[in-house]
Image (cartoon, grey):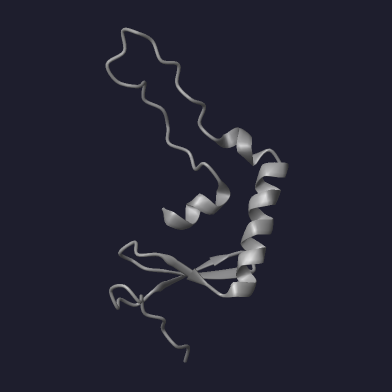
Amino acid sequence: MEDVLNCPACGNAMIERDFGRTQVNQCPDGHGVFLARADLGDLIDAENDWHRDGGAFHTAPMPRITEDMTAPPRTTPKAPAWIATLFT
């Protein structure tokens, strides 16, 4: 039986998520993401691979702003980086 990690901010049981070789523990109330120190390097490598392999082209372009606009045009929200998916 594995030990359940609790969020240090709220005490709730963390949700374990797998990201390839890395396991991340995430607070269900959004207080943070916790991982083993060694796994941080794997996440950095995955982020760099995402950018090198053209992942940055999947980010949303900035909308063109015109004088007559009252609100920005609607766009599909896209993650600014692969690692941002940890927080969604």
Residue 67 shown left or right of residue 86 in the figure? left
Q: Residue furthest top?
A: 68
Residue 42, quarter of picture: bottom right
Residue occupying image coordinates x 55% and y 71%: 23
Spot occupied by residue 12 in the image (x, y as percentages of width and height): 30, 76
Spot occupied by residue 79 in the image (x, y as percentages of width and height): 49, 43
20 and 25: which one is in front? 25
Residue occupying image coordinates x 64% and y 69%: 21
- Vertical position of residue 40 compared to residue 12: above or below: above
Spot occupied by residue 34 in the image (x, y as percentages of width and height): 47, 70
10 and 15: which one is in front? 10
- Vertical position of residue 8 compared to residue 84: above or below: below
Spot occupied by residue 51 in the image (x, y as percentages of width and height): 67, 43
Residue occupying image coordinates x 56% and y 49%: 82
Residue 48 shown left or right of residue 37 in the figure? right
Q: Residue furthest bottom?
A: 1
